[in-house]
Image (cartoon, grey):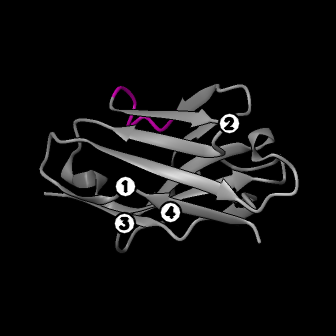
Amino acid sequence: QVQLVESGGGSVQAGGSLRLSCAASGYTNSPSWYSMGWFRQAPGKEREGVTAIDSDGIASYADSVKGRFTVSRDNAKNTVYLQMNNLKPEDTAIYFCAADTSGFGEVTTGANFGHWGQGTQVTVS
């Protein structure tokens, strides 16, 4: 059974940091082949893309998090990380990781990302 499990969420004050992890398991093929994305959804808002990292480790970021968030992956551990620094109240949301199993994933919306984690809450006050 394919699973993506996020962890590391919590409550912090503005200016603080959190590191989210997304552990993949149950894949027949190595998930290191897939581009991975982090998305977030705040109450009353649509899901938005935060960052994505491809199989070569090349990353892209939403303008709102550039310079503050860093995505990385450890293919040996089948884990993707999101280091979030200088957090702002507007970063408050549920954060999801997802695997682009189709190869056509839309990094701004998450469309066509085939596998999703259950999400982890990040609250910045």
Residue carrying label 1: 8
Q: Eyeballing the image, is 50 above or below 7? A: above
Answer with left or right where residue 4 lies relative to residue 113.
Answer: left
Label 4, label 3: how far apart the Cα atoms are: 7 Å
* Residue at figure coordinates x 50%, y 35% from the top left: 71
Q: Quadrant of residue 82?
A: top left
Mark 1 or 3, closer to the camera: 1
Q: Is 67 situated left or right of 56 in this image?
A: left
Up-down relation of residue 51 to residue 97 (above or below): above
Q: Residue at x 55, y 63 (%)?
A: 5
Query: In 3D space, how far apart are the residues under numbered discs 1 and 2 (Cα atoms)?
Result: 19 Å
Residue 31 in percent (x, y) is at 76, 47
Query: Which badge, 1 or 3, comes first in the chain's sequence?
Result: 1
Whether residues under marks 2 and 4 lie with C-beta atoms below 8 angstroms apart, the answer is no
Q: Secondary structure at mark 2?
A: loop
Residue sitting at 87 percent across and 50 percent down? 29
Binning the other alpha carbons within 10 Å of mark 4 as few (below 14), some (14 to 19) or many (20 upward) gives: some
The residue singled out by tag 2 in the image is 75
Residue type at the position of mark 4: Arg
Give the residues in magenta. 61-67
Q: Badge 1 local density, few (<14 within 10 Å), some, or many (20+)?
A: some
Q: Nearer the viewer, mark 3 or mark 2?
A: 2
Q: Which amino acid lies under the numbered mark 2 shown in the image of this protein?
A: Asn
Give the mark nearer the N terminus: 2 vs 4: 4
- Could you tell me which secondary element the residue under label 1 belongs to? loop
Q: Which mark is residue 47?
A: 4
Magenta segment includes 74: no
Which quarter of the image is occupied by the C terminus? bottom left
